[in-house]
Amino acid sequence: MRAPPLLELVDLARHFPVRNAFGRRTGWIRAVDGVSLAVSAGETLGLVGESGCGKSTLGKTVMGIHAPTAGEIRFAGREIGRLPRRERRAVARDLQYVYQDPGASLDPRWKIVHSLHEPLKIHTRLSRAEREEQVRAILTAVGLPDAHLDLYPHELSGGQQRRVGLARILTLRPRMVILDEPTSGLDVSVQASVLKLFRSLQEAFALTYVFISHDLAVVRSMCARIAVMYLGRIVEMGETAAVFAQPRHPYTRSLLAAVPRIGGRRVTLDFALPGEPPNPRDVPSGCRFRTRCPLVQDVCATQEPPLREVEDRRVACHLA
Amino acid sequence: MTELLSVRGLSVDFVTDGGVAQVLDGISLDVGRGEVVGLVGESGCGKTTLARAILGILPAGAARLRGGEVRFRGADLLRADPVAVNDRVRGRAITFIPQDPSTSFSPVFPVETQIMDLMRWKSPRAPGGNARAPRWRYPRERYRTDREAVLETLRAVQIPEPARALRRLPHEFSGGQRQRLMIAMALLPDPDLIVADEPTTALDVTIQAQILRLLRELVKERGVSVLFTTHDLGTAHELCDRIVVMYAGQAMEAAPADVFFARPAHPYTRRLLASVPTGTGEIRDIPGEVPSLVAPPPGCRFHPRCDYATPECRAGRPAPRALAPDHEVRCHHPVDAPGGVDA
Amino acid sequence: MSAAWFVVRRLTRDRSALLGLLLIAALVLAALLAPVLATHPDDVFELHPAERLRPPGGPHWLGTDRMGADVYSRLLFGARITILIGVIAVGASLLVGVPIGLVAGYHHGWLSDALMRVSDVFLAVPQVVLAIAIAQTLGPSLPNVILALSATYWPWFARVVYAETRSLQKEVFVESTAALGASPWRLTVLHVLPNIASPIIVRASIGMGFTILTAAALGFLGLGPPPPTPEWGRTIAESREFLPDAWWYAAAPGVAIFLTVMGFNLLGDGLRDVLDPRLRRGRGAR
């Protein structure tokens, strides 16, 4: 057994109340409903799933943007899910979060130089000269010239804004960064540039990534381990190459079968998963996937399958 | 060969705050009967503008036609009588599936009202440009026939319980179901050509697979041609018979799908295909950035980022060269082609 | 300060905003240079009963009032009162309303509800009526007018700031700066406030017009600064019994009020057009 994991989630849950017109609570959206996983220092864990699976909410809950409804978040051995606000803010030094468009995280009325100095001003007592040194180092690391410091965000291109947004987070030298759909909506060549940047930054700063995405091809090229989520829970988790080669959960199989490939036979000719993902308000009893599963049996309706070890990975299926 | 749709030398400018952007530069392409053609390109390449130009819905104030023609069934849509085009072509012979299903419907009317409104004007049984019969009249007979057609088409797009579904409001449907409704609405006027603008971009991958399969089955069944824009190469592979690649307002290469993916000749196409992430191998991107269309690079617009660029590429736009009867490329140095460069 | 210059340049392209700017500039000049520009500067205090109610012409450009004082000169000095009241009243409203709006916007709970209900109560009563009530209770004087006006205008600032703060909280850059560990104080003062400066400025400009109008109303009702202060509203009240013969007596201050209020409104509208889209508009051709 090596060093303890950097991040550990134990049965983490985050529910959102549904209120009717009078403000009374009529139900819950169980966005994250019992997730347990561990991330070791230096690795990249991919979190995949379709809309409504809860991966974004999971990222935000770990980050502290939402408070957990239940369960524990342990970061570097310390429980951080229930910390008082001031102490939780101090954790931001080590655990950071990148939005889908990091450029949007910049205050439009602030010059780049001030946006980059700000994290250091909040968390450290470095002198101005020391901060300047750090900022310059980070700018070089993300591949931007010093001249950009004097500009406003709207004077930079989208790609440059993205790099500045990343630089801002990296000034704190966090140990772990949660990337939430970082390549969603990007052109494929731009996406390639961004992924290259992430890889080089990971090396330069010894970062640990949690990579949230719905794009399986991207996750496959970036993440050594992958966790597949469906309706608030993890249904399969293991090494990426193994999961892709031989998916054990029926949902994972359908998900992989749906991804268009370039060259070869058209995948959609054979694609057979019917229906839509159910509403997170109305989670089916027993196994959540049973309403669409091609292998459904009676037991699937009565008992929720736990996430258990099966050979080289973990699967939540009665039939795996 | 009588193509259904034939675009020749289309050039469109947009007037913007920063200057005049040359959004389309001499685009030519063909769509045959019953053919699914994919327009592939990254943001800013002009594919959406081209789709809009074909439909004739470019923003009137900002867009300026600089030249070229769009021939549909032989007639040039850009120079024909606008009233006739609006009546017989737009929404009838050529229909449209927009990108975002959540904003395609009016939120306040039930689906039935909106679809039947479409049928009143654009049903195959609606009177043509005949000035004598008042066209806003919707005789009960035709209404009933049209409604039957609607129900049947809804069944074809796999909307469960079509009669009940019609009475619902758009927000009661999921994104995938709304896109099915849009497909139904695009098929109901019995069109010759459907223009689809990134129809599955906003959908989850499993829903996307369902929709792509459905779309391909339906158009092949009915012999409808499709011109469909996308930036996702995988989707293009799933749906298209032929693919046209655009970059910064210029068409670069056009080939049948299997040739396109197996033996691309244009350097941009090759770079584009190479940047799709595969296993954990090296990630290859394209150096440089997409050029501004207000001051685009002269000649071939890709030359500043191209590995094989020579002064020739800067001097003038390469003429279209046919590498095979179906495979056309606009490049001075096509890769692995006679007269070109080696990979 | 290049930002201010940019704003002025954009403003001058809009003709009505330019008109507003010129009117305000004229007002400010009149107020500042009153002793210099006035033909009869002492008429503010001295009386010349022999000259009473002379029509415009000769040494009296806009005629004389019932005390024989030069209407034009008194008008200029009245401009000083007008600006004083406007600036201080709006300034005080701003200083009270903006912090209240910020607190209400930032908090989500009983405090924010309470503050906004209080401001709603103030807004529910027509401003003029409320100002009259306050001024009446406190007695007619310049400070009391200013107090009454501030007390009735602050909710407008609170409202605008509350709405903008709430909407800004959902912006990615606010959420991400909070995720970086910024304290609420830092977020509010350094990030939210600069980004809502535009709506505050617009509201202040429009508020000036409105406040000045209400001040004139108070003056008209005798609740403003007592004579011999050449306040415009009071002058109109004085002129009432001499209408319609001594039309210049009422027309001069009336037109002055009209032009001032219109000037501020035009400027406010122009500012709104210049300041807001600039924030949201991106750059460059796509």
Image (spheres, coloured by chain):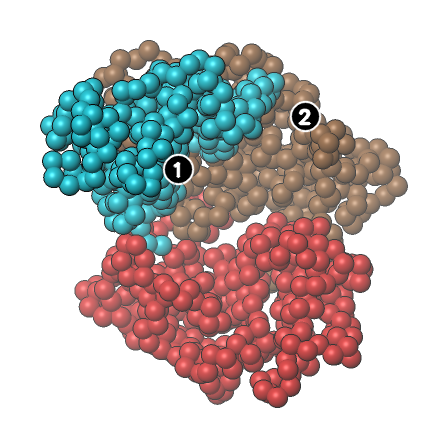
Chain colours: A brown, B red, C cyan
Looking at the rendered structure, the secondary structure element under dot 2 is strand
Question: Which amino acid, mark 2?
Answer: Ala
Looking at the rendered structure, the secondary structure element under dot 1 is helix
Q: Which residue is the site of mark 2?
A: A13
Asked if residue C96 can be seen in this view, the reply is no
The image shows residue C9 at horizontal and vertical percentages of 22, 43
Q: Quadrant of residue B112?
A: bottom right
Q: Which residue is more in the foreground, A192 or B58?
A: B58
**Label 2 Cα crowd, 10 Å radius (few <14 / some 14-19 / many 20+):** many
Q: Which residue is more in the foreground, C58 or A52?
A: C58
Q: In the image, is residue A80 above or below residue A314?
A: above
Q: In the image, is residue B49 above or below residue A105?
A: below
Q: Quadrant of residue C22?
A: top left
The image shows residue A208 at horizontal and vertical percentages of 48, 27
Q: Distance between the residues labelled 1 and 2?
A: 30 Å
Q: Which residue is the site of mark 1?
A: A103
Identify which residue is drawn at 30% across, 48% down.
C16
* Left or right placement of residue C235 versus residue B151 in this view: left
Identify which residue is drawn at 43% across, 60% down.
B41
Identify which residue is drawn at 55% across, 36% down.
A212
The chain ID associated with circle 2 is: A
* Left or right placement of residue C252 versus residue B4 in this view: left
